[in-house]
Amino acid sequence: MVKAAVFSLLYPLLLSALVLNCQCQHRTLHVVYMGARPDGDVSVASTHHSMLHKVLGSASSAKESLVYSYGRSFNGFAAKLSNEEAKRIAEMEGVVSVNKNQVYKLHTTRSWDFLNLTTDKLGAPPQSDVVIALLDTGVWPEHPSFNDSGFGSPPAKWKGACTGQNFTCNNKIIGARFYNSDGYSGGEDQSARDTEGHGTHTASTASGVEVEASYFGVAEGVARGGVPKSRVAVYKVCWSFGCNSADILKAFDDAIVDGVDVISVSLGSDWPADYVDDTIAIGSFHAMKNGILTSNSAGNSGPYPVSVSNFSPWTLTVAASTIDRKFVARLQLGDGQILSGILINTFDLNGTSYPLIWGGDAANYTIGSSPDYAKFCLDGAMNTDMVAGKIVYCEALFDGATILLANGVGTIMSDVTFDTPDYSFSWPLPATFISPEDGKKVLNYIKSSCNPVATILVSDAWKDGMAPIVASFSSRGPSAISPDILKPDITAPGVDILAGWSPLAGGTSVYEGDTRSTLFNIVSGTSMSCPHASGAAAFVKSLHPTWSPAMIKSALMTTAYVMDPRKHRDLEFAYGSGQINPVAAQDPGLVFDASEADYVNFLCKQGYNTTTLRLITGDNTTCASTTAGRAWDLNYPSFSLYVEDGHKISAVFTRTVTNVGDANSTYTATLYMPSPSINVTVSPPSLTFSSAGEAQNFTVTVEGPAIAQQPIVSGAIVWTDGKRAVRTPLVVYNYLPGAPYNLDGSGGTAAPGKLPFRNSRSGKIGQVKPHPQF
Ligand SMILES: *[C@@H]1O[C@H](CO)[C@@H](O)[C@H](O)[C@H]1NC(C)=O
Ligand SMILES: *[C@@H]1O[C@H](CO)[C@@H](O)[C@H](O)[C@H]1NC(C)=O
Ligand SMILES: *[C@@H]1O[C@H](CO)[C@@H](O)[C@H](O)[C@H]1NC(C)=O
Ligand SMILES: *[C@@H]1O[C@H](CO)[C@@H](O)[C@H](O)[C@H]1NC(C)=O
Ligand SMILES: *[C@@H]1O[C@H](CO)[C@@H](O)[C@H](O)[C@H]1NC(C)=O
Ligand SMILES: *[C@@H]1O[C@H](CO)[C@@H](O)[C@H](O)[C@H]1NC(C)=O
Ligand SMILES: *[C@@H]1O[C@H](CO)[C@@H](O)[C@H](O)[C@H]1NC(C)=O
Ligand SMILES: *[C@@H]1O[C@H](CO)[C@@H](O)[C@H](O)[C@H]1NC(C)=O
Ligand SMILES: *[C@@H]1O[C@H](CO)[C@@H](O)[C@H](O)[C@H]1NC(C)=O
Ligand SMILES: *[C@@H]1O[C@H](CO)[C@@H](O)[C@H](O)[C@H]1NC(C)=O
């Protein structure tokens, strides 16, 4: 099922990166996956070399072709191959799959910036043995967030390395590797030094020490990561063009052996991909096998349904939500009116008022522009003489560059297509972004005044009483591939997050003309929420070093802060189990554990057979007979029931909980299901434990009438012992308004037993690219 499909080009971006990599004609980077690492002291590299020798005809071309040997945690290699050569390699013994290198994107809604990270309220006890790995753009090693003052030497288990030119590790950043398989670095150093800002931001969010911070004077205060005493291991897999899958896989291979505790991956593809086509799913499967939890971003393709990526059940999939602050840039009109906009304005006009015009009155008629274009302040539409020295009111959200380049003083924007921003932008000139309603007031003032003037104030942080709310850009469930697994798992702060930045990355990530340098920035995205979850996972791991990845994940999910369903049309498909609550996750009471065998069983239920299963596990694991069916028995800390149109609601879930609370304890189930027509039964209704580590089973039966074209209904099952609440959401759904994908699966290539969801290899998903437009 896979070999023919792996060559399909899923990502247009891929092409540009592949071209760069081509010294030899038609040879592009391929990832050859050969499964689990052979036992014993075998040189896998020489095997890889001789395989290439056989296909390419000479030792020297084999040497030239081979980019990586993976052999530390699993077996495989990356090599430059033509399609023909790749096919021949695919037929060789021991080869599980051959995939063309893919380029993944960073999950930041870049260019919109702002807010003030006081992040986690957890007082972190000593966690100096926990190592958080970040697969990202690297870090700025001299950044104050990674000051190692007071840190002892790395934990004894640490086996990592610090490589690269002009990059020095310390006792905070204890490892740094970089991966650049196609040799193109866009002028960046051959090291894990971050020139983008993204990796410094994610690493300092998860692990940064306390440091005085501000973004050009805005949001002054103390910035810190969730687990300031933890160590950072950096794996630079992303460069200015994106992140190669060959590099990502190599980074997983190394991180597992290096001895990291949590892997944080704030990147992914734009569209859902089946597990076999997803490097992050495969790398994180091996991490799970080795006791390491991978936390990954859900993606920035919301608010469209079925847009979540990185949804493998062995990882934690993190959505992004607001915190209780927002940035407000006020403006004052000459008549005394004060209006508030959402934007991070760092430029101080010192209270001076400047002439104010409407963009429509500054059309460049000589090139055929008109007020209808100029009111949007479009590139090339403006008469620069009219703009110079003025504040311009524009009826569109844009980066302000046309006004800046025409020597305008500042800009006031509003946009009827985008009236309630839930995250803040920051532009390279004095600016604010007001509601269309307030925009009318500005326009009325301009039209009714003979000498209109205005000034824009530096932004203040305001309290946002609505938080937490999942951001519009955060990708929504359900999972396109596994409808029986509720995704995303959890939400964490990902809007207007202040954290470290690379001083080489510029002041506003959108506009290259902004040459200001900053050590901190305020940005939004699931890239920003993911390291919050990684930090929380590291915190739990530091307190419970023997817990499996599934136990840590369960602790985070069952203790999550319950989100307000009234504020979220998509309910759990926006926020999963709720907002991460690290302090409560220390003591979850009961956990839902799962082992490699459980995930294998899950894949078999998904329609994988012994052959296709191997594409993920890489070993000789088999599927027991014909096990395809619903994946309701994976011991997952949430419940998801997809019902086809016209079918009755009917499912039995089995679960096992392990006692990690008081030895002698009794937990009683409480049910919450708002729909009276859906019957939910939990059996037995109470569970009694007499020792720590004891496991007990229960079943959840869900029954109801046939449904069609109905939105999701969600409830929850909560086990309580009087002190702790172990909460698991339960979602029943069959219809998603506005889903971008055809959910009936017609024409799909789903394996037998898979639910009729389109999988990535249908080639059709690529036509739909829900993505923020800014
Ligand atoms: C496994 O599944 C694939 C794709 O569904 C199919 O092509 C293959 O024949 C199956 N193999 C076996 C051994 O059933
Ligand atoms: C690191 O922190 C220590 C203690 O606060 C301080 O003395 C030192 O100057 C800092 N080093 C850097 C490079 O900022
Ligand atoms: C090392 O990098 C720093 C930061 O970019 C730079 O200031 C310094 O000149 C570099 N040193 C060398 C030897 O390249
Ligand atoms: C965030 O803003 C609040 C209130 O404006 C301020 O008290 C706090 O110090 C700021 N924190 C950071 C990290 O900037
Ligand atoms: C505002 O005042 C500061 C400090 O005096 C000065 O540096 C800055 O240029 C002034 N800004 C404008 C727009 O005049
Ligand atoms: C109008 O547009 C043309 C073409 O871009 C440009 O050369 C000219 O300078 C513009 N006029 C003004 C007054 O901005
Ligand atoms: C799988 O089994 C075959 C035959 O028993 C054996 O040759 C091979 O080494 C095994 N592969 C792995 C990865 O264990
Ligand atoms: C649990 O209860 C049993 C029987 O009541 C008792 O023997 C045992 O000591 C208790 N264990 C703990 C840790 O309290
Ligand atoms: C729970 O279920 C598993 C699998 O069905 C079974 O092996 C185990 O004995 C059960 N445990 C208890 C306490 O009933
Ligand atoms: C729900 O349970 C009640 C009581 O057992 C029963 O009367 C009813 O028919 C059930 N409804 C469904 C939809 O199964």
Image: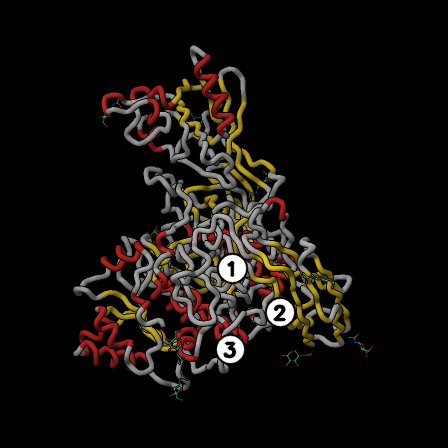
Q: Indicate left or right for 366 with 254 as reference.
A: left
Q: Determine whether 477 is above or below 47 in the image.
A: above
Q: Which residue is found at the position 53% from the left and 78% from the top?
A: 597
Q: Mark 1 points at which residue?
A: 317
Amino acid on which disc 3 is placed: Thr
Amino acid on which disc 2 is placed: Phe
Q: Quadrant of the C terminus?
A: top left
Packing grade of label 3 (10 A; few <14, some 14-19, many >=20) is some
Packing grade of label 1 (10 A; few <14, some 14-19, many >=20) is many
Q: Name the residue under label 3.
A: 627
Residue 226 in view, yes or no: no
Q: Indicate left or right for 96 with 312 as reference.
A: left
Q: Which mark is residue 653?
A: 2
Secondary structure of the residue carrying numbered label 1: strand
Q: Which residue is found at the position 23% from the left and 71% from the top?
A: 65
Frontmost of labels 1 and 3 is 3
